[in-house]
Image (cartoon, rainbow, N blue to C red):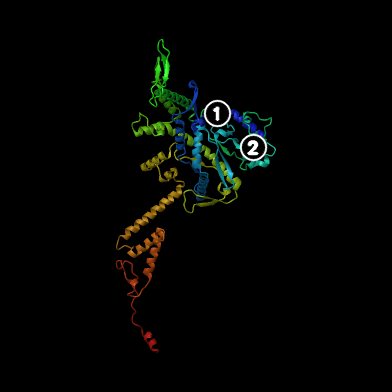
Amino acid sequence: MLAAQEIVELYNQRKKNDGPIKEQMRRIRDLANGDIVVPLNELDRNSKTSVANLLVQGLDQMSMRVASTMPQPFFPPTKEGSERAKNQARQKKQAMLAIWDHNRMNMKLRRRARHLLAYSNAPVVIKPNFTTMMPTWTVRNPLDTYAAPVEDADDPLPYDCIFAYRVTVSWLVRTYGEKLVGQLGLQDLEIDKRFLLLEYVSPEGIQLCAVGNGDESYEDGVLYGGFSAVMLEQIPNRTGMPLVVNPRRITLDQPRGQFDGVLGMYYTRARLQALTEIAIERGIFPEEYLVARSGENPEIIQVADGKIGQLGVVKGGDIQQLQVNPGYKTDTALDRLERQERLEGAIPAEFGGESGSNIRTGRRGDSVLSATVDYRVQEAQSIFESSMIQEDKIAIAIERAYWGAFQKSFYIPGRAAAGMAVYVPNQLWNNDFHYVTYSAAGSDVNGLIVGLGQRLGTGLMSKESAREADPLISDPDLEHDRIVAEGVESALLSSIQQQAVDPNGPYQPEDLAYLTRLVVEQNVTLYEAVKRTDQRARDRQAAMVPPGSPEAMPGLAMPGMGAEAPMQSPPGPQGLDALLAQLGG
């Protein structure tokens, strides 16, 4: 592990190298948050923007499309044709889906999609959670992430990473007071003064250190001379693996977000719009000048006020108004800038619920939207596929390193009853080889469902493959069992209905009423109710009752249909031995 001063030096070095990239990220953040102020130097004033923020519209739409479908992990059986290997592979998938579900992976992917498209990377750190005894995903802000450089630009797994964030003096004293006595100059600072905390994550461990005395100048490179760095925590990393995964957008040579090119156009459009509004305001309230006549000394007797209808009175001169024309090409320039923003950031008009003026048919609209969106969504989802494979491997290593010999349980997503499974990590995770794939990378959830239905209708895809591709089905095997069970239950119900309408059928009124009472009142399953009704009929038909008893009558049923119990035969003539026995002979 590194010393506190070494972590600080590494942080400053990486911060200096990533300075221009982080500054571009901050500009994107300010634009997305609406914190842009347009300087109007000609008028010596500033103005807030009053134009549509296309960046936010495009970022939200693209990220929601990327995260509208969830990928699925696939663990191949270790031995082909072995039922035990297939069951183990299925349990691995269910355990990983349970871990994802516990971490609310669908929500985290939505935030990470925004980070990937806007900042060009989406870092996440996986740590053991000793409260839930599960690996926990934590999404980190790319602005405060300083990952180690990697040789392969497509490798999402850096060797180590530094996360920077700020905390108050009161939090430091409350959490680590005994470690800070006499250090960092806390006694001379306000309780709300903020300190810089550096979290260094490496295969050796996780280290947390507090830096400086709360002065911003420390981050500018002034390392020593009154400043200090204190190590707060050092936690060993039992996995021996990097715990940070940082996927990046595919660019030429440096990180670049999808909307980096729209910044200048947005500034120009916002500034032009602000100047136009000022010109319109001057046209509503024009500037007036008092112009003297030849040889006269002008004088204003009464100031005009148009808002209250008061006329102005002047002596020895004329009032002239100066009309301001915003310019006949202003609207054209604004529309041209908006179009350039849409082209640069791939933000079609359909994202805002509108349609281009040259779109005449729905088919043409779908083609234009697909050409703009689909391939970008496909690339982002492919990046997340590669990233999540590494994330799952880290989670498996955490399970084995920290709770390998403990018996753990999880609830299988999608099962309402009997959905809990038990496993031992060292036995279940005998290897971490697996795939993570989207059903159809590049398709959002609406387009995916339509495509699956079309392929099923044309016979190009099996129902099993469709169940595996459907994002709403977490367990295709369980869904198959449910479909089979529902089909058999439907066939049983149809058989009962067909036999019940036949007066000569096996279901007589009293038996059908008993079956209905079991299902409706006692909430017995249909197959169990049929079994009880059949056993009741068998017992009745096997019982012998005396002639004339009520059980021997058919009741509402047709005679001879099995509704009545069989009668006992009348006794025959007694034999000679029986008669002699009665006489005592």
Marker disc for residue 454 = none
Q: Is residue 72 above or below residue 34?
A: below
**The residue under label 2 is which amino acid type?**
Cys
SS state under label 1: helix
Tell me which corner region of the image, top left, top right, bottom left or bottom right, holds residue 584: bottom left
The residue positioned 29% from the left and 66% from the top of the image is 558
The residue positioned 46% from the left and 46% from the top of the image is 474
SS state under label 2: strand
Quick one: quadrant of the C terminus? bottom left
- What is the C-alpha distance between the residues marked 1 and 2? 25 Å
Instruction: Name the residue tied to disc 2.
Output: 209
Instruction: Name the residue tied to disc 1.
Output: 23
Drawn side of residue 131 relative to residue 50, left or right:
right
**Front-most of 532 and 132?**
132
**Front-most of 374 and 348?**
348
- Which of marks 2 and 1 precedes in the sequence? 1
Tell me which corner region of the image, top left, top right, bottom left or bottom right, holds residue 443: top left
- Residue 23 picture location, percent across and down: 55, 28
Drawn side of residue 7 relative to residue 103, left or right:
right
Q: How many marks?
A: 2
**Front-most of 292 and 144?**
292
- Residue 21 picture location, percent across and down: 55, 28
Q: Residue furthest top?
A: 295
